[in-house]
Image: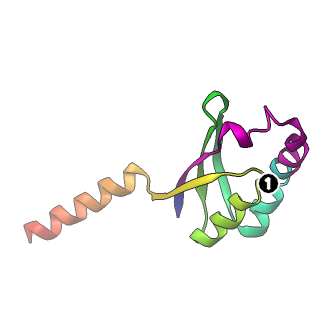
């Protein structure tokens, strides 16, 4: 199952402005690959939009719980929006099947 994640934090919580937070952030980001293996979460992409205090990810996991544990490991005060998503190819296939059933 794929999940699109939007993560935000405020300037008050930003490690760029509070460098004492940077070591914990870097350590937690450095552990993401290992944690992903442990939780069976694959990060297809993880992108940071630093000027706007926002990050985006596309994660693959068997459960929302695994995604939540993965994201909560990031040592920043973050707000998360997690949306289950699918490839457009799956949507096209679903549409074809629905049309075939309707034509019967």
Q: Element under label 1?
A: helix
Give the residue displayed 60% in from the left and 53% down from the top: 79
Give the residue displayed 9% in from the left and 72% down from the top: 104
Q: Is 25 included in the stretch rendered in magenta? A: yes
Task: Specify start and end residues of the magenta stretch as a single range.
Answer: 4-27
Residue 9 locus on image (x, y percent):
65, 44
**Which residue sits furthest front?**
12
Give the colouring mode of the picture.
rainbow
Residue that carries the numbered disc 1 in the rendered image: 33
Regarding residue 62, the answer to whether it shows in the image is no
Residue 93 against residue 76 in the figure, above or below: below
Give the residue displayed 24% in from the left and 65% down from the top: 97
Local crowd size for mark 1, using a 10 Å CA cut-off: few (<14), some (14–19), many (≥20)? some
Residue 36 quadrant = bottom right
Residue 56 quadrant = top right
Residue 10 locus on image (x, y percent):
65, 41
Count of numbered circles in the view: 1
**Which residue sits furthest left?**
103
Give the residue displayed 73% in from the left and 68% down from the top: 39
Residue 88 against residue 39 in the figure, above or below: above
For this rendering, which residue is in front, 29 or 21? 21
Q: Is 59 included in the stretch rendered in magenta? A: no
For this rendering, which residue is in front, 43 or 23? 23
Lateral position of residue 96 relative to residue 63, left or right:
left
For this rendering, which residue is in front, 87 or 25? 25
Residue 65 against residue 59 in the figure, above or below: below
């Amino acid at each position: 199952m794929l999940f699109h994640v939007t993560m935000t934090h405020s300037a008050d919580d930003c490690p760029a402005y509070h460098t004492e937070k940077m070591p914990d952030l870097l350590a937690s980001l450095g552990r993401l690959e290992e944690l992903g293996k442990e939780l069976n979460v694959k990060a297809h992409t993880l992108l940071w939009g630093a000027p706007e205090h926002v990050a985006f990810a596309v994660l693959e996991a068997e459960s929302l719980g695994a995604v939540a544990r993965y994201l909560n490991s990031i040592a920043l005060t973050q707000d998360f929006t997690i949306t289950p998503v699918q490839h457009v190819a799956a949507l096209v296939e679903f549409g074809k099947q629905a049309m075939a059933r309707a034509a019967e």
